[in-house]
Image (cartoon, rainbow, N blue to C red):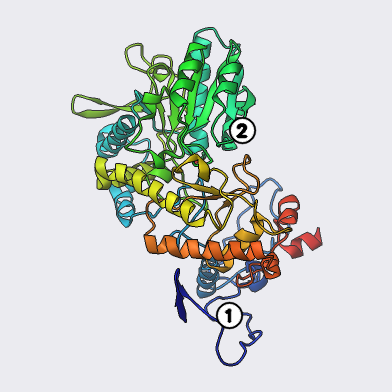
């Protein structure tokens, strides 16, 4: 091993050639694993169950005619199969996860410990509320933090992810317009750089989406946006900080113009990590914004872990917010499930989910908030922004950084494929990073930057970890600029080399091959 500037790095063996292949296909601790259908046998079972008593069938002739060929394995074989597969995953507990837009930060173990307390983990949503006062208090306290941090009037805790929160916010806007007899306002303006969920949400809720262009410095074209406002516009959906990693400095002016034209402002708050404790969206004229608890407030995600997307509302939209919500009456926490004229959800549009939302995520997020405190949350934003700028400035010489000239970035740094050698693309850089032992950054998003590479290091990475990542990305970028052909076939050290991703996306083979052959 030799050490270089960016940390430890293995070099080629000094004496003798490495062996080309092993009998097993394994490479030391990198273990080959076949599909469960290939290693399991239909007549093997991990459990022996006594033969069932014969009873007359009650399936009305719908009994299965033949065995379905499920593979069987013994218990240790099963455990090994899944453990081997799990080791082929990249994870936040293995290393830096640079995925831009995703805020893949470390999840403190304390959060897990709290979420697993039986009083939170084992409650049932239909339990009488006097038996779940503690759980309701968690929701109530978290609501208070979210409303305070955002400077808004109320919060709907039930949406189950960011995109679900968007739908919640847009439905409240729709209800508010209908209450004013202005249901004819059908257009939602969405900047070109928006996350794909924004236009999808607006369209799903029955609105027509119109694109607003970006300026050369990567921000919303305010002039184009205000010029489009009019009696058919329901509102705008703007991400701030935006998906180019930049703060939308004109948001207050945009909100004022939208309000003057009779519309509402939806802010996609998925990037709240960059401004938490520093900026209150309520002060910028936002009417509704979702917060991804599973981004800003840690909690595990990526790979399908549950999300949670509470939505904060302005005074204008609060009457239309969904039910239920938790309220404190005297010293009791109550669940308000129906709108009443007196409370602040008098014209509620209804419910987003059957119950109250993701209890486990609430507990994790509140634990995270309480363990940081108000000053700690502010520091989260500052460190996240500092880390992203460190990545941007360290790499701007190695990769094209289209907005580096517009000043500091927020929580994420964006690069493009502009100065790679002829025939080399962002995809090659991403694949090269896999060989370096990193999950690739977000690629080809946002669409406004050609061959975009979006890196969000988050605040939880140390300088040493950032330096190692920067060293790896610089090395791969330099190979791509020098036209190193070996990069075109990377990754070389992963269990499988370059896959045909177009084919995989267009013709996914989701059934085991023997079944496919039999059909
Ligand atoms: C993650 C994200 C979303 C969607 O959030 P989900 O929880 O994945 O539904 C929306 N907008 C932006 C900018 C995001 O980063």
Q: Position of residue 351 (x, y in %)?
A: 46, 26
Q: Nearer the viewer, residue 124 or 147?
A: 147
Q: Residue at x 46, y 26 (%)?
A: 251
The tag earlier along the polypeptide, 1 or 2, is: 1
Where residue 67 sits, quadrant-wise, is bottom right
Task: For ligand 1, tell me if the residue under mark 2 lies within 8 Å.
Answer: no
Residue 192: numbered disc: 2
Q: Nearer the viewer, residue 453 or 311?
A: 453
Q: Is residue 262 shown above or below 302?
A: above
Number of numbered tags placed on the structure image: 2
Q: Which residue is mark 1?
A: 27
**In the displayed structure image, the side of residue 175 where residue 203 appears, left or right:** right
Q: Position of residue 463 (x, y in %)?
A: 38, 60
Tell me if residue 94 can be seen. no
Q: Position of residue 159 (x, y in %)?
A: 46, 34
Category of crowding for the residue at label 2, using alpha-carbon neighbours closer than 10 angstroms: few (below 14), some (14–19), many (at least 20): many
Q: Residue at x 76, y 53 (%)?
A: 507
Q: Residue placed farthest to the top in the image? A: 181
Q: Residue at x 29, y 46 (%)?
A: 367
Q: Nearer the viewer, residue 382 or 314?
A: 382
Q: Secondary structure at mark 2?
A: loop
Tell me if residue 474 can be seen. yes
Cα distance, mark 1 to mark 2? 46 Å
Q: Residue placed farthest to the bottom in the image? A: 16
Category of crowding for the residue at label 1, using alpha-carbon neighbours closer than 10 angstroms: few (below 14), some (14–19), many (at least 20): few
């Amino acid at each position: 091993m030799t050490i270089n500037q960016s940390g430890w790095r293995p070099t080629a063996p000094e004496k003798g050639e490495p062996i080309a292949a092993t009998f097993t296909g394994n490479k030391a601790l990198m273990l080959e694993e076949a599909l469960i259908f290939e290693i399991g046998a239909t007549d093997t079972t991990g459990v022996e169950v006594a033969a069932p008593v014969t009873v007359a069938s009650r399936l009305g002739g719908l009994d299965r005619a033949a065995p379905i060929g499920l593979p069987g394995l013994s218990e240790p074989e099963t455990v090994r199969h899944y453990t081997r597969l799990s080791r082929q995953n990249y994870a936040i507990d293995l290393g830096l996860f640079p995925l831009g837009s995703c805020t893949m930060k470390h999840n403190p173990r304390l959060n897990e410990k709290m979420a697993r307390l039986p009083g939170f983990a084992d409650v049932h949503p239909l339990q009488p509320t006097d038996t779940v006062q503690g759980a309701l208090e968690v929701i109530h306290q978290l609501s208070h933090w979210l409303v305070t941090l955002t400077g808004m009037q109320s919060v709907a805790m039930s949406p189950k992810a960011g995109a679900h929160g968007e739908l919640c916010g847009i439905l409240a806007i729709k209800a508010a317009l209908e209450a004013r007899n202005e249901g004819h306002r059908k257009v939602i303006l969405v900047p070109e750089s928006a996350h794909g969920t924004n236009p999808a949400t607006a369209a799903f809720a029955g609105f027509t989406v119109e694109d607003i262009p970006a300026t050369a410095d990567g921000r919303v074209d305010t002039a184009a946006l205000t010029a489009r406002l009019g009696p058919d516009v329901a509102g705008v959906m703007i991400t701030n900080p935006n998906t180019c990693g930049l703060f939308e400095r004109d948001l207050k002016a945009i909100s004022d113009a939208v309000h003057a034209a009779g519309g509402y402002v939806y802010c996609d708050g998925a990037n709240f990590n960059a401004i938490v404790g520093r900026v209150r969206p309520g002060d910028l004229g936002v009417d509704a914004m979702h917060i991804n608890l599973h981004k800003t407030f840690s909690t595990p995600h990526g790979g399908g872990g549950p999300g949670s997307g509470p939505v904060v509302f302005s005074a204008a939209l609060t009457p239309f917010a969904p039910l239920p919500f938790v309220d404190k009456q005297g010293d009791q926490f109550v669940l308000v499930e129906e709108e009443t004229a007196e409370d602040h959800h008098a014209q509620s549009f209804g419910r987003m989910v059957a119950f109250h939302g993701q209890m486990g995520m609430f507990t994790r997020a509140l634990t995270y908030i309480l363990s940081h405190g108000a000053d700690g949350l502010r520091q989260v934003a500052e460190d996240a922004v500092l880390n992203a700028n460190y990545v941007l400035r360290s790499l701007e010489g190695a990769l094209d950084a289209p907005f580096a000239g517009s000043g500091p970035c927020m929580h994420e740094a964006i690069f493009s494929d502009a100065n790679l050698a002829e025939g080399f693309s962002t995809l090659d850089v991403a694949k090269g990073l896999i060989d370096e032992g990193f999950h690739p950054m977000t690629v080809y998003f946002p669409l406004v930057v050609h061959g975009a590479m979006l890196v969000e290091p988050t605040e939880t990475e140390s300088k040493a970890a950032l330096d190692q990542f920067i060293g790896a990305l610089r090395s791969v970028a330099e190979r791509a600029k020098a036209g190193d052909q070996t990069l075109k076939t990377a990754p070389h050290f992963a269990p499988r080399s370059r896959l045909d991703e177009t084919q995989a996306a267009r013709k996914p083979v989701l059934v085991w091959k023997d079944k496919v052959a039999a059909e």
